[in-house]
Image (cartoon, coloured by chain):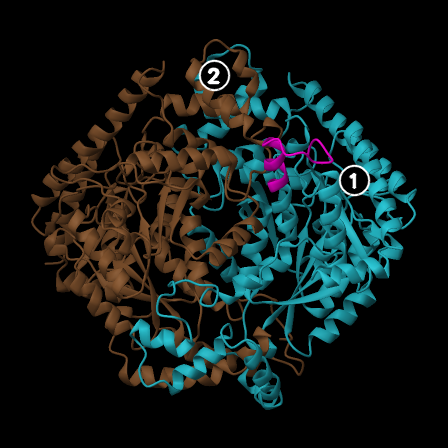
Chain colours: A brown, B cyan
Amino acid sequence: MAEIYSDLIPRVCVHLSVFFYVSGPESDIGGKRRAPDRTTTTTKIKKKKMSQQTVNGVPSRGKVLTLDNMNPNVKRVEYAVRGPIVQRAVQIEKELKEGVKKPFSEVIKANIGDAHAMGQKPITFLRQVLALCSYPELLEDNKFPEDAKKRAKRILQACGGHSIGAYSASQGIECVRQDVARYIEKRDGGISSNPDNIYLSTGASDAIVTMLKLLVCGEGRDRTGVMISIPQYPLYSAALADLGAVQVSYYLDEDKCWSLDVAELRRSLNAARQHCNPRVLCIINPGNPTGQVQSRQCIEDVIRFAKEEHLFLMADEVYQDNVYAEGCKFHSFKKVLFEMGPEYSSTVEMASFHSTSKCYMGECGFRGGYMEIINMDPEVKAQLTKLVSVRLCPPVPGQALLDLVVNPPQPDEPSYTTFMKERTVVLADLAEKARLTEQIFNKVPGITCNPVQGAMYTFPRITLSQKAIDKAKEEGQVPDMFYCMKLLEEEGICLVPGSGFGQREGTFHFRMTILPPTEKLKVVLHKISEFHLRFTQEFS
Amino acid sequence: MCAGNKLQNFRVKSLVSVMVCSLTSHPLSSSPGRALSSLSATRRGLPKEKMSENGVSSRAKVLTIDTMNPTVKKVEYAVRGPIVQRAVELERELSEGIKKPFAEVIKANIGDAHAMGQQPITFFRQVLALCSYPELLNDSTFPEDAKSRARRILQSCGGNSMGSYSASQGIDSVRQDVARYIERRDGGVPCDPDNIYLTTGASDGIVTMLKLLVCGEGATRTGVMISIPQYPLYSAALAELGAVQINYYLNEEKCWSMDISELQRALDEARRHCNPRALCIINPGNPTGQVQSRQCIEDVIRFAAKERLFLMADEVYQDNVYADGCQFHSFKKVLFEMGPEYSNTVELVSFHSTSKCYMGECGFRGGYMEIINMDNEVKAQLTKLVSVRLCPPVPGQALMDLVVNPPQPGEPSYENFIKERTATLSALAEKAKLTEQVLNTVQGISCNPVQGAMYSFPRITISAKAVKEATDKGQQPDMFYCMKMLEETGICLVPGSGFGQKDGTYHFRMTILPPTDKLKILLNKVKEFHQKFTQQYT
């Protein structure tokens, strides 16, 4: 049936896109306009077909699957965090290994929030329990503390055949979901959480994509629009491209420490309503890549806005333990929502995401995560449950790990002291590194850096001269990519250009993680500072 | 996306009548309906206006069944469908002390070996424990080969920790080991680690590949050929991607074998309304358990070359071959033995997983795919696409490494490993035979030999009376049958309708994984139930 319907779409699209080209005012959606994209693609494919096709519509030569006949949405996907600059970094690493001389002895990958890769040690308790779950014979071993054994036994008992090798329920192991719910209740000062509203996921990314997938529908002007911040974490833009949804950009205010402004939300929404159907508002708090921590007031305003404008809220809260700045505190969207009273708490639809990859754990490789859904329509919830069942279940070791994160050692348990010590050290180090980064960068003429209030990144603004911009253009690169590429080649430091996250036109940034060990971080910061001075001189 | 307007233009007119009638019956869920209404609407914007326009009350949720992604609604996945949900409910009722005609629910709906009591392979779990908690490397109770594997895996992880992200394509050294494994398996046919992509279970790889392949609209929309019966991941993924499912039927009378003339029939018919570009094969078969002959695979490859189809070979049961005279032949090996005319041109992807075979490590979500003859630009797009999800779970990657690089003769764990592996595989072979034998003694059940994989897919005779009662209840007859069996015996099977079957035939899928003694009881219960059911509805 869908195929029959879609026969009409091309014509409708053409009409709409003509309209767009004339009236489309959104410079901020640059390149993400769906309908014009479609028209371009159509023309391209048509041309190709003329030259390549035989009578029955099959090209006579070449591969079955080519760049011209693959999924066009996939082609539009971009993910800068692992983009060309990282590929080049990997190449350089290989070259170094092969003995090629470089002006540096190692590549430092500050492009991604990968704590363990940067030398952060895993939390002992978490890994003990995982070892016990992997090889339950160790339960007989008296080297392991009792609380670790107890946790492992509890997890194993909840697994089919007492093995983490069995599939779990698609929504996640029940007792883990119960623990998650209790954790949320504790975090939110007692606001109740129903384990049935918890869905474990393969990292937060998986859940975010799943939720977006549920939300996308309509065609042309009725196509679902999703509001995301600029700068954003590029998973969002990538997922939206993949799903063929319309990206609706709202800008964070760099001059006010990357804060979110409801007037800007409204501007962006009204502009978007001209050409799509905005239904979702995504927030990342603490911010990635921008590191801001939202005030309680701001969150309230956002919730009010979402209610007023009938938007589904998606709160990406994976950095909820990563708050460093004095006076800043993490407020969960859910808590604020419920404190605003039943008018809001019983109506505003929301999903909140969390993960094992960030905070003090940094266990990215396990791909653990969860989402809590609030006020979701029961029929839609049933569809969600069905949808996740197709992928069978999230990785069980990641589920086990998440269980430990939400249910860590308690004060009366043997592992408590060590656990707290390890946790505190990691978070205190991060706080120090956040400060250090801001301080050092702000001393460099041409670099300005907001305080890293939370999360794991700094996103400083860099001044690039017209000469540098022209040079970049000559090389066919966006200016901050040119800058980062040069930094990589000269210093072996891998950053992500701001253009990969989005930024106001004419401004340039990069994202750098603050994760390297303090001594190494200092070296990195100084190298970047020197590079920036050199770069500025070269292109002045 | 709007490709092929020319081709379709003449079709549009003739389809208008169909559309109008469809629009009438599904006014809310049709996307073109929306597109059309948006053209005439003066102004949208305010949610209230929009809602009344759609006939939804202003109190409605943002996200409702009528305003959600229509392709998601079309997704169905019987293996974890309503019958399994009921089974979970029954389990809860039992644990609450509610009396049932059975003491436990036996979930024979899914190939979940460990849940059925199969023990993990010791060596694998030792290495995983070592990787999880490297302090154990100092523990003398672990064998040296387990330690050396763990060290090698950890050394290729960032910061020597499984907790760091790996490369999106998978850890380098693991992909190298996979490539060597494939070369060994295929008698030396070379394999490039660069063509290996580690995945989150095979499902992830399959969905990713299908996603790459889907394009076009209307009559140029990508069609994908899948067997009927099929593993419902395929139909679910195609529904979600909005691709066209093209059914080709396996021949139940010939032990669920695949027939080229049937492929041709399905393809020719499909060409009238879509653009068939991919052919999916599951070998050994799920749910049907057949193992394809070398000749059959050659024929399929020739067919794919002739008809210009991208081949997707789901080979996750490659170690699960039980029947005498049957042998697993990988599509890749056969392709390369057919000479450069084929091996240089036919585009193929093969999938494997840690979830099946003798390991049965489903929970780790490990897997890989090998791509062959893929266009370089497309490959770059694939690499980019998988990077968005960062990486497959690293413990699953580590496990995959052990599966493709198990203990070797001379290593301390070798003997025990082989013992465990053999015990599992020979028990499965025995259970395959047992299942076929017992089920074939029941009048009204006929069952092909389980040549491989982990399931039996017997045909059941359901009387007209029973079919009528099911229809009255709004259920598929085999769903009605399986639901009744669940309620009366506690056995959870999946109705054949969830996999697809020839019209008028009925089946169920049952895994052969329960321990032999339990399997015997289960088979006898199925037998008794079938007899009772038949009697009740004559």
Which quadrant holds residue A225?
bottom left
Compared across the picture, whether B293 is left or right of A286 comes to right
| Mark seen at residue B161 | none
Seen at 65% across and 75% down, the residue is A60
The residues colored magenta run: B88-104
Q: Quadrant of the C terminus of chain B?
A: bottom right
In terms of secondary structure, where does tag 1 sit?
loop
Seen at 66% across and 83% down, the residue is A55
Q: Are marks 2 and 1 in contact (CB under 8 Å)?
A: no
Which badge, 2 or 1, is on the more N-terminal residue?
A: 2
Q: Is residue A5 magenta?
A: no
State the CA–CA distance, disc 2 to disc 1. Answer: 37 Å
Which quadrant holds residue B537?
bottom right
| Mark seen at residue B136 | 2
**Label 2 CA crowd tier, 10 Å (few <14, some 14–19, many 20+):** some
- Residue type, numbered disc 2: Leu
Chain letter, disc 2 residue:
B
Which quadrant holds residue A56?
bottom right
Residue marked by disc 1 = B321
